[in-house]
Image: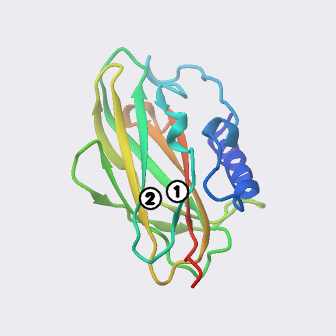
Amino acid sequence: MSARIRRTAFLAAAAVLAAVPGSLGTARAAQAAHPVTAVTAGAACYDGSLQVADRAVGTVQNATRVGQKLDVVIPVRNLDGATRTGTFVDVAVDAAGKNKSAPPTIWWRLDNDPWHLVHFTWVAPTMKGTDPQWQSPDLGLGTFAAHQTRSLVLSTSFGNGSTRGLYTGWESFGTSSCNGMEQGFGAFAVSYRIAQA
């Protein structure tokens, strides 16, 4: 199943559950399971070789004030028996209905490494029926030892120009030597709903 279909499935499930605070279900409920594809660029280059833990999406955290940080911890496991170098992740956030809004501020780090700011680019829809997105460049994660699990942490906050509502996003993982093939996929959701006075 393609990354676009998986993202569409997740966004559809998120939209249905957006009005239910505190629960979005597991990632398996929000996106269809996807089969392993044929090896195209070596033993480690297949869809699913970087396994993203389902608990990456369990509850929807809600920011009730400007600048409040919402942290999502996403465990990622190298399923291969060899060290994987040149690993990266792309982060995208659905921007439906937020065309005049500022993107959320997202900082990321791997394990306890230093924090890095995600620099988003606005990307208009390329197909009918799809939403605009804020997309990151490749974020370099470095090396995963054989069968190693590392944790990607995304810390999201909202500014004065942010639109209130549900923000759904996803992470697409790959390795530089695998010719751009997606090797892992995860999803997350956060909400910005200022508390009523």
Locate residue 29 relative to residue 95 in the image: left or right.
right
Would you identify the image quadrant in which residue 75 lies? top left
User: Residue 188 location, x and y as percent?
Assistant: 54, 50
- Residue 182 visible in the displayed image: no
Say if 162 sits above or below 116 in the image: below
Name which residue type carries label 2.
Answer: Ser
Residue at position x 65%, y 43% in the image: 25
Say if 141 sits above or below 115 in the image: above
Locate residue 181 relative to residue 111 in the image: left or right.
right
172 or 20: nearer the eye? 20
Which callout, 1 or 2, points at the residue further toward the start of the chain? 1
Marks 1 & 2, CB-CB < 8 Å contact: yes
Residue 136: assigned label: 2
- Looking at the rendered image, the quarter that the N terminus falls into is top right
Name which residue type carries label 1.
Answer: Ala
User: Residue 66 location, x and y as percent?
Assistant: 44, 77
Residue 30: assigned label: none
193 or 36: nearer the eye? 193
Classify mark 2: helix, strand or loop: loop
Instruction: Tell me which colouring the rendered structure shows.
Output: rainbow
Would you identify the image quadrant in which residue 60 lies? bottom right
Locate residue 16 relative to residue 82 in the image: left or right.
right
Disc 1 and disc 2: Cα gap in Å? 6 Å
Say if 146 sits above or below 112 in the image: above
Classify mark 1: residues with Cα within 10 Å, few (<14), some (14-19) or many (20+): many
Residue at position x 74%, y 52% in the image: 12
- Looking at the rendered image, the quarter that the C terminus falls into is bottom right
36 or 45: nearer the eye? 36
The residue at which mark 1 appears reads as: 92
